[in-house]
Image (spheres, coloured by chain):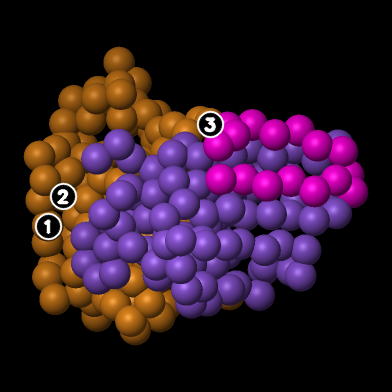
Chain colours: A orange, B purple
Amino acid sequence: DQQVKQNSPSLSVQEGRISILNCDYTNSMFDYFLWYKKYPAEGPTFLISISSIKDKNEDGRFTVFLNKSAKHLSLHIVPSQPGDSAVYFCAASKVDSWGKLQFGAGTQVVVTP
Amino acid sequence: DTGVSQDPRHKITKRGQNVTFRCDPISEHNRLYWYRQTLGQGPEFLTYFQNEAQLEKSRLLSDRFSAERPKGSFSTLEIQRTEQGDSAMYLCASSLVMGGDVRFGSGTRLTVV
């Protein structure tokens, strides 16, 4: 039962432009969402998170938007840089089982010069 | 903050052998998690501890898998009688009990031949 879905397996974007990654979830009990970046042969690196009581969180070039009614969140990276080329995972958790994360399948981002 | 440390980074074993992996969490984190990731998928939750107590085990965790965190610090994950389907990246993560971020180690890549 895939409760977190990333429907775009890949995304190609030009350097300097905006990358928009999308994530949908089915379980309305999720109340915390996280984005991770992963390079090959490494563990996921935390990027940014958002609580369900917010609809936007920003950290430098990264902004996460949450639309609870649509059960949808997105990650915006602007401007995109070559070092952003990686696989990005969306994850969700419930407060009463903190850290037990449900992950999407990931989106491969390639930033081209 | 020295990060989450996992050992070994890579393990190749013959089918039927037992293997053990170690994870050292971030020192102030009292929750520790084990995840498994296969190619093209996001990490899947296996089990987690709060201090030395194992709070939950996924149904993915067969009887051949056992995890311990004897003193509430480092943890070990043992797989007995390995099978080729056990080949995956095994990820350890840690966090505070509530709030904050879930930080991952670099993982142990297991190959069963």
Q: Give the spatial CA distance, label 2 vs label 1.
A: 6 Å
Q: Residue B13, image x and y in percent?
A: 81, 37
Disc assigned to residue B62: none
**Residue at the disc numbered 3:** A41
**Amino acid type at mark 3:** Ala
Q: What element carries label 1?
A: strand
Q: Nearer the viewer, residue A64 or B48?
A: B48
Q: Quadrant of residue A79?
A: top left
Q: Give the spatial CA distance, label 3 vs label 1.
A: 29 Å
Q: Give the spatial CA distance, label 2 vs label 3.
A: 26 Å
Discs 3 and 1 share one subunit? yes
**Amino acid type at mark 1:** Asn
Seen in the picture, residue B33 relative to B50 is either above or below; the reply is above
Is B21 inside the magenta-drawn segment? yes
| Circle 3 chain | A
Q: Which of A105 and B79 is in front in this view?
A: B79
| Circle 1 chain | A
Q: Which of A67 and B46 is in front in this view?
A: B46
Q: What element carries label 2?
A: strand
Going from N to C along the chain, the mark reached first, 2 or 3, is 3
